[in-house]
């Protein structure tokens, strides 16, 4: 790994990752479209027609869940409407007029793929299904899902204007998994909630078989199926500090394909700290030396051969005369740019830490004053 430093005099811009196209993996999967993404860096480790626009079925509910978590209050009580109850497809079998916590609806949405829950959530959080769909599309733009449009909160085939791509769904999942509440819900195997019709609990078992029985490293995900979309699946897995996201669209063998992709990445790649958090020792300039640092580390999934392809450049503002007198030094003074195979893949801010002036207590003050009068400087 190489490191170098240059000075910059322009405004500091954080860079969009521009990973090289992944090396063609020796994987044979059945999906029409697929993506395997490193959850931390966003690096694509495997892809198959990742930007092909397709129907996505119930993996739509990942967006429904994260919008509900971020925009709603999970302890709110939701009154279930007739419209929600009569939504076709997979169901929690909610009753008209039933009152249920928003949190419980989100669990039912993710574990049992309840379409009635999706509509109840949308009406409560968005004011209407249409209002909630607007929030879904706004969030998609915010995340950077450029080839996605939502027309409902459940993914049913009721519109040709409801679509996404494997890559966009990986971006969405990467975003959602940064939310602790979402991560907990998506990784729950069984959830119990009181049934208003009796003295027993509703027991919801997660439909994601990777999580419940097939793959020990699974941490969550969402299943999907409609006649037009066929089988769709988003899943996540973690081994040590290595977190992965797999997405397949129109895949008759999705369980096996996800396991293949995860095992491929876990066997081939290791997460490497290419830029540690904290003080930057490589800076030799007398003004900056020992006084610049980063607040975040950069970790990339790399093979042994790829480690040599990583370079880090430190780009710093040219110090002004006033700064050397301790005046008007900005806190943000540069950026650390990480290159992989000569492409910029990450950029994080570099901060300046001013010299801290030691505050002396009264006892030290009088000791110094006495020493000065005696012609001797106390060492404290």
Image (cartoon, rainbow, N blue to C red):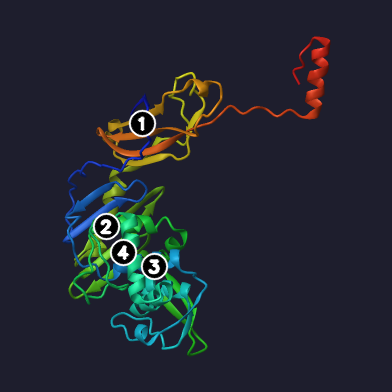
Q: Earlier in the sequence, mark 2 or mark 4?
A: 4
Mark 1 crowdedness (10 Å alpha carbons): few <14, some 14-19, many ≥20: few
The residue positioned 18% from the left and 61% from the top of the image is: 53
Q: Earlier in the sequence, mark 3 or mark 1?
A: 1
Give the percent coordinates (x, y) of residue 300.
Answer: 34, 41
The residue under label 1 is: 10
Give the camera-side residue of 194 and 363. Answer: 363
Give SS at disc 4: helix
The residue positioned 36% from the left and 78% from the top of the image is: 119
The residue positioned 43% from the left and 39% from the top of the image is: 297
Quadrant of the image for the N terminus?
Answer: top left
Q: Is residue 209 visible?
A: no
Residue 137 numbered mark, or none: 4
* Residue 102, placed above or below residue 27: below
Q: Is residue 330 visible?
A: yes
User: From mark 4 to mark 1, how far is it between C-alphas?
Assistant: 34 Å
The residue under label 2 is: 168
Mark 2 crowdedness (10 Å alpha carbons): few <14, some 14-19, many ≥20: many
User: From mark 4 to mark 3, how far is it between C-alphas?
Assistant: 13 Å
The residue under label 3 is: 65
* Residue 313, placed above or below residue 144: above
Q: Nearer the viewer, mark 2 or mark 4?
A: 4
The residue positioned 26% from the left and 48% from the top of the image is: 44
Give the percent coordinates (x, y) of residue 256.
Answer: 24, 62
Q: Earlier in the sequence, mark 1 or mark 2?
A: 1
* Residue 139, placed above or below residue 205: above
Give the percent coordinates (x, y) of residue 337.
Answer: 35, 34
User: From mark 2 to mark 4, how far is it between C-alphas?
Assistant: 12 Å
Q: Earlier in the sequence, mark 3 or mark 2?
A: 3
Identify the image quadrant of residue 69: bottom left
Q: Earlier in the sequence, mark 4 or mark 3?
A: 3
């Amino acid at each position: 790994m190489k490191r170098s430093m240059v000075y910059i005099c322009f405004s500091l811009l954080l860079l969009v990752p521009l990973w090289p196209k992944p090396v063609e993996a020796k994987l044979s999967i059945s999906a029409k479209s697929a993506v395997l993404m490193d959850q931390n860096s966003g690096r694509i480790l495997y892809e198959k027609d990742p930007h092909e626009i397709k129907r996505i079925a119930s993996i739509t509910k990942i967006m429904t869940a994260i919008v509900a978590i971020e925009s709603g209050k999970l302890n709110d009580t939701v009154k279930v409407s007739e419209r929600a109850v009569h939504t076709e497809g997979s169901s929690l079998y909610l009753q008209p007029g039933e009152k249920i916590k928003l949190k419980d609806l989100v669990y039912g949405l993710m574990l049992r793929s309840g379409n009635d829950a999706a509509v109840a959530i949308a009406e409560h959080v968005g004011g209407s299904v249409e209002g909630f769909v607007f929030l879904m599309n706004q969030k998609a733009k915010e995340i950077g899902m450029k080839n996605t449009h939502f027309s409902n909160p459940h993914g049913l085939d009721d519109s040709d204007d409801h679509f996404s791509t494997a890559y966009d769904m990986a971006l969405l999942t990467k975003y959602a998994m940064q939310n602790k509440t979402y991560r907990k819900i998506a990784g729950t195997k069984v959830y119990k909630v009181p049934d208003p019709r009796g003295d027993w609990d509703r027991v919801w078992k997660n439909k994601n078989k990777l999580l419940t029985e097939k793959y020990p490293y699974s941490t969550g995900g969402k299943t999907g199926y409609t006649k037009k979309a066929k089988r769709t699946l988003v899943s996540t897995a973690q081994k040590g500090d290595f977190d992965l996201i797999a997405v397949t669209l129109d895949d008759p063998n999705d369980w096996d394909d996800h396991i293949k992709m995860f095992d491929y990445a876990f066997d081939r790649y290791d997460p490497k700290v290419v830029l540690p958090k904290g003080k930057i020792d490589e800076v030799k300039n007398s003004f900056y030396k020992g006084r610049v640092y980063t607040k975040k580390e950069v970790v990339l999934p790399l093979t042994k051969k790829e480690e040599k392809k990583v370079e880090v450049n430190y780009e710093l503002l040219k110090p002004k005369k006033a700064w050397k007198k301790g005046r008007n030094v900005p806190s943000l003074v540069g950026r650390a740019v990480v290159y992989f195979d000569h492409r910029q893949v990450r950029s994080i801010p570099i901060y300046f830490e001013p010299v801290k002036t030691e505050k002396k207590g009264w006892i030290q003050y009088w000791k110094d004053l006495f020493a000065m009068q005696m012609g001797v400087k106390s060492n404290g």
